[in-house]
Amino acid sequence: MDKLAISGFILAILAVAGGFMLEGGSLTTLLHLPAFIIVVGGTVGAVMLQTPLPQFRLGFSMLPWVIRPHSLPLQNTVERIINWGASARTNGFLSLESAALEESDPFLHRGLNLLVDGVEAQVLQDTLDAELTLERERMLRGARIFEAMGGYSPTIGIVGAVLGLIQAMSNISEPKLLGMGVATAFVATIYGVGFANLIFIPVGNKLKSLVYQHTLYHELIVEGLVSIAQGENPRNIERKLAAYRLS
């Protein structure tokens, strides 16, 4: 569990709600179903319109990462790469065949297979770099869904406000209905701005940060496997990979 993300979300909500209550407001006035439907439904619908289905599915499949980010076995991977380098220098690349067969990480699995096949170091690097770039861009497109929601949400909130005012003006002779329309107008604006700045944009930025961490981890793998392909000393490989552990 990412305690910082959870704490940040709770702090933001408590700060907004607490400040509103200190001004004498009642939280029940912020609970308005029509405004919620307008803002959330309109925002999601707009993003669905602009986004291909695979990208839309990917973005929401990444959402749990905000609370439960994938644990990257950085230290363990560095140690294994160093051991593979020592084995390759002593017994040749074919000695890594069993490690390749047992490897569960798809990226490491493909890289080890290329090593076992005896491809040149430059070909190995070009192949893995291309795969890494494409994977990073694919995941970033998923994360940008929430950035798009953060862009649409305030505007949809304004749409909700206008709709509320239209409803209010049509019932200007009935004070009760007039009040309900005005409430929808203001609450929809709060929902639009609040969801954008407290949920959608932070979630999008958090996912992009996690994608970059994932990319850095794979860059470490590429650096290590290319160094093995070049026949470098395991100590030199360890010194190279030490920089990634400090990033």
Image (tube, rainbow, N blue to C red):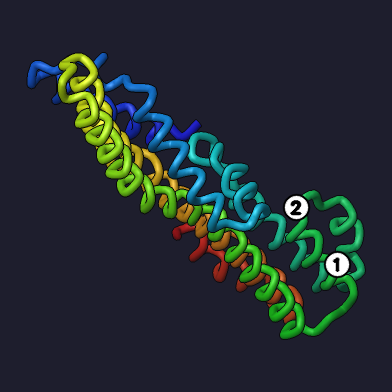
Q: Residue at coordinates 60% horizontally, 50% vertically from top-left?
A: 56
Q: Residues within 10 Å of mark 1 (few under 14, many from 20)?
A: some
* Mark count: 2
Q: Which mark is residue 113?
A: 1
Q: Secondary structure at mark 2?
A: loop
Q: Are marks 2 and 1 in contact (CB under 8 Å)?
A: no
- Residue 12 visible in the snapshot: no
Residue at 46 percent of width and 34 percent of height: 2
Residue type pointed to by label 1: Asn
Q: Position of residue 203 (x, y in %)?
A: 43, 44
Residue 163 image offset from top left, x and y in percent: 30, 37
Q: Which is more N-terminal, label 1 or label 2? A: 2
Which image quadrant for residue 34? top left
Viewer-closest of 87 and 64: 64
Q: Which of these two is toward me, 161 or 200? A: 161
Q: Position of residue 159 (x, y in %)?
A: 31, 43
Q: Amino acid at mark 2?
A: Asp
Is 169 left, or right, of 8 in this rendering?
A: left
**Which of the 4 image quarters holds residue 118?**
bottom right
- Under tag 1, what secondary structure? helix
User: Looking at this view, is 227 or 216 the one in front?
Assistant: 216
**Residue 31 sits above or below residue 135 on the image:** above
Q: Is 95 left or right of 19, judged from the image as shown?
A: right
- Residue at horizontal 55%, vertical 54%? 49
- Which residue is located at x 82 percent, y 72 percent? 115
Residue 114 picture location, percent across and down: 83, 72
Q: Residues within 10 Å of mark 2 (few under 14, many from 20)?
A: few
- Residue 78 - label: none
Estimate the spatial distance between the alpha carbons at disc 2 and disc 1, rounded to whole Å. 12 Å
The residue tagged 2 is 105
Q: Is residue 20 above or below residue 186?
A: above
